[in-house]
Image (cartoon, rainbow, N blue to C red):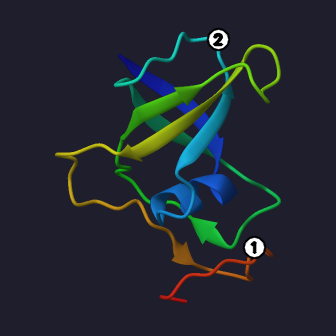
Amino acid sequence: MEHQVKIRQCHLIHILKGRKKFEIRRNDRDYQVGDTLAFLPLEDENYDAYKVESPLPKFKITYLHYDLGMAAGYVAMAIARKPGESNASGLPHQTGANDGRQTMDEDE
């Protein structure tokens, strides 16, 4: 099953760069391992350093974690870029200041 989920661009760029490999969501869609996440970037007025480009790759849910350590009704999902997706990365072009997060990325 494919789930179209909204996400702020400041979080999406870290997924696209491979830094963030999980997503925590309210489990109101009965997410299952093997399902696909299609991210829908939201305009982020407090974050204008990057603009995400289309088309965006889709991601497969590879692991689910409920209960222990999670708020009731929420799920942590391990995600991976879906095999067979186009070469489009969706990676943004930097247009402004750093987002303020400290990262250890060799390409920066």
Query: Of helix, strand and loop, which one carries label 1?
Result: loop
Q: Give the mark nearer the N terminus: 1 vs 2.
A: 2
Whole-percent x, y for residue 52 in the image: 51, 60
Image position of 38 (left or right of 74): left
Q: Nearer the viewer, residue 95 or 85?
A: 85
Quadrant of the rendering where the C terminus is positioned: bottom right
Q: Which quarter of the figure has residue 98?
A: bottom right
Considering only vertical position in the picture, is 81 above or below 2?
below
Whole-percent x, y for residue 58 in the image: 36, 41
Q: Disc 2 marks which residue?
A: 28
Please name the residue shown 29% across and 43% down the image.
Answer: 82
Image position of 103 (left or right of 100): left
Q: Disc 1 marks which residue?
A: 99
Tell me the tag on residue 85: none
- Label 1 crowd bin: few (<14), some (14–19), many (20+), radius 10 Å: few
Please name the residue shown 20% across and 52% down the image.
Answer: 86
Please name the residue shown 63% across and 41% down the image.
Answer: 7
Amino acid type, callout 1: Asp
